[in-house]
Amino acid sequence: MIKLLNDWYNQHFSNPQVAILAFLLLLGFGIIVLAGNVLAPVLAAVIIAYLLDGGVDFMRTFKLPRFIAVLIVFNVFVLVLLIVLFVLAPLMLKQATQFVLEIPGMLAAGQSALLLLPEKYPNIISEQWIVELLNGLRNQLTELSQRVLSFSLSSVVDLIAFMVYLVVVPLLVFFFLKDKKSIMEWFTDFLPADRELVTEVWSEVNGKIVGYVRGKFMEILIVWIVTFITFLAFGLEYSMLLSFLVGISVLIPYVGAAVVTLPVAIVAYFQWGYNSDFMYVMIAYGVIQFLDGNLLVPLLFSGMVNLHPTAIITAVLVFGALWGIWGVFFAIPLATLIHAVINAWPRKADLMKTAGA
């Protein structure tokens, strides 16, 4: 057994660069897992600064000094943050509360329609099964309504933490953007001089990850805006809330769109019933999903993520279970990182060539 482990280690880790890469990956993973909660503001600021740095580079193409470019990009970021906090978030919270309050009425209205099913299909559906189903749904929805309505920042600790994050994260973002060069030089001083493999993996992953994350933000924004305008044009209730759900559904490929279809269909059905308005809204929603998957995604991510759908779904499940919504959002970039590491990892033949040389 010891010989097998020794042979496996010599085969995969005899190259010092491989050991350095493995150490850095384990160190990064360990910091996130063990100190993720404590360093959450720092990690969030690093990610935001990483994304905004592309905007700084774009502004510098107009021959602006880096500090001026950083100020412009940072001010735009703060403006967007304020709009989200004081305009969009209260509006969506209000619509979510109204929707939850109307759930019992929707359930009562749908009960009569469901009770007609045993008359139409007596050999398949029994009245007792429908009653048990409605009772179960009513209990679950009542519990959910109580949780949503009781959710608030009433806790002093939560409120203080939120205010601290609201101040600390933007400040960290500004300094990460302004002092990027000095921070990178300080960090690389701790790395070994012989780090070609680490550089190779980073060069392969960097372009794909930053392109994917920025593209995903653009996809969410475009789908959200287009869906909101469409729902608003049809007069669908809770247009802002539903369009936001449709926008963030693109985070989970192949699954998100199917899941969000249910609340859209429920709201449309209870607003209009099964008529032409309902059909028009669902057809428009289907067209948006079709254009997103067949036009927008290829334009934004062409050649950027070369992963099998099974790998994507597995990554979403694994990282979503580990880190919640952030794990879902970064599942594909993390899967891309793992894929790049596996591709760049020296094989036995490479090690033999290196040894022979």
Image: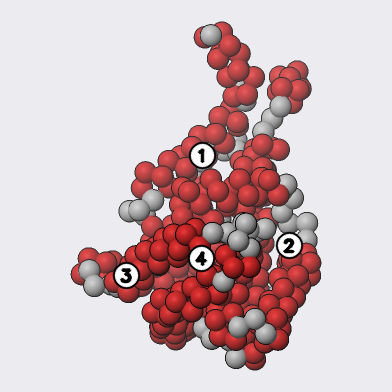
**In front of the other: 88 or 277:** 277
Q: Amino acid at mark 2?
A: Phe
**Circles 2 and 3: CB atoms closer than 8 Å:** no
Q: Earlier in the sequence, mark 4 or mark 2?
A: 4
Q: CA distance from mark 4 to mark 3?
A: 38 Å
**Disc 2: CA contacts within 10 A as few (<14), some (14-19) or many (>=20):** some
Tell me the residue that label 3 is attached to.
Answer: 146
Q: Amino acid at mark 4?
A: Ala
Task: Write the residue at 41% across / 71% down.
Answer: 170
Q: Earlier in the sequence, mark 2 or mark 1?
A: 1
Q: Quadrant of the C terminus?
A: top right
Q: Amino acid at mark 1?
A: Leu
Q: CA distance from mark 1 to mark 4?
A: 21 Å
Q: Position of residue 90 (x, y in %)?
A: 40, 83
Q: Quadrant of residue 221?
A: bottom right
Task: Write the residue at 73% across / 78% down.
Answer: 283
Task: Write the residue at 60% across / 74% down.
Answer: 265
Q: CA distance from mark 3 to mark 1?
A: 45 Å
Q: Position of residue 257 (x, y in %)?
A: 64, 65
**Mark 4 vs mark 3: in front:** 3
Q: CA distance from mark 2 to mark 3?
A: 41 Å
Tell me the residue that label 1 is attached to.
Answer: 24
The number of numbered badges drawn on the structure is 4
Q: How is the image coloured?
A: secondary structure
**Mark 4 vs mark 2: in front:** 2
Tell me the residue that label 2 is attached to.
Answer: 301
Element carrying mark 4: helix
Tell me the residue that label 4 is attached to.
Answer: 49
**Disc 4: CA contacts within 10 A as few (<14), some (14-19) or many (>=20):** many
Q: Earlier in the sequence, mark 1 or mark 4?
A: 1
Element carrying mark 2: helix
